[in-house]
Image (cartoon, helix red, strand yellow):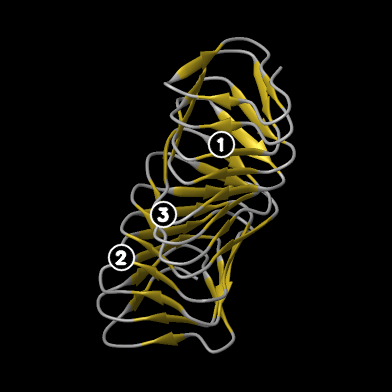
Amino acid sequence: TLNGGATISNGATVNGLATLNNGATIASGLTVTSGTSSVVDLTTSSTITSTGLVTANGGLTSNGLITGTAGATISGAKLTASAGTDLTGGASIDALTVSGTSTLTGAATLNGGATVNGLATLNTGLTVTSGTSSVVDLTTSSTITSTGLVTANGGLTSNGLITGTAGATISGAKLTASAGTDLTGGASIDALTVSGTSTLTGAATLNGGATISNGATVNGL
């Protein structure tokens, strides 16, 4: 347990049940290798690597790199990754706010009320498993899969595949699927613009002011 503004530097490794309280600072990297580690009121300007569980009960702010290896969980009510931050690996990330020019890579999963703001880039896939997750001003070159609710308040542009499983809703005033995009599954899609040679398959539903233009194809129901 580290209290009272303790600082971890030079790539320290924490095994087992580590707890950081009261504004502890990680200057150059923390690795959690096992067990359940609680990160409370933690500010880091460098790297967090977790192969276990990292919990931020009082707020985790990272200006550097958060890495979650396969099966790792990074959770908490006030997780913030600021501009330039990369979120990589197979991490399950709960209630995370990502802003600025951050990049989400790998098979990261955002649960609950996760929010992506600014010019975030999703390279290989975002999964929303529950709750209401807001994807704002997000550009993705690959896949968005939602079993919950994905809301694009500021515009969602997909050059890859948007998949909505049964009951999923992908909504927003400025959803755009560009040429070649597939919209599949049982998704309910609100106010979507589909252009080019895009294809809508399965039981997809278009609500509101949805527009299909320029030779787009709709298959199924």
Q: Which residue is mark 3?
A: 102
Residue 156: x %, y % from top left: 45, 71
- 112 over 141 or under it: above or below: above
Q: Nearer the viewer, mark 1 or mark 2?
A: 1
In which quarter of the view is residue 207 placed? bottom right
Q: Earlier in the sequence, mark 1 or mark 3?
A: 1
Q: Residues under labels 1 and 2: Cα distance? A: 24 Å
Q: Earlier in the sequence, mark 1 or mark 2?
A: 1
Residue 12: x %, y % from top left: 48, 17
Local secondary structure at mark 1: strand
Which one is nearer the viewer's eye here, 47 or 172? Answer: 47
Q: Which residue is mark 1?
A: 92
**Residue depicted at x 74% and y 41%:** 58
Which one is nearer the viewer's eye here, 114 or 161? Answer: 114
Q: Nearer the viewer, mark 1 or mark 3?
A: 3
Residue 1: x %, y % from top left: 71, 17
Q: Residues under labels 1 and 3: Cα distance? A: 17 Å
Mark 2 Cα within 10 Å, few/some/many (few <14, many 20+)?
A: some
Q: What amino acid is at disc 2? A: Asn
The reply to whether the C-beta atoms of the residues labelled 3 and 2 are less than 8 Å apart is no
Q: What amino acid is at disc 3? A: Ser
Q: What amino acid is at disc 1? A: Ser
Local secondary structure at mark 3: loop
Local secondary structure at mark 2: loop
Q: Which residue is mark 2?
A: 159
Residue 133: x %, y % from top left: 62, 58
- 141 over 56 or under it: above or below: below
**Residue depicted at x 44% and y 61%:** 184
Mark 1 Cα within 10 Å, few/some/many (few <14, many 20+)?
A: many
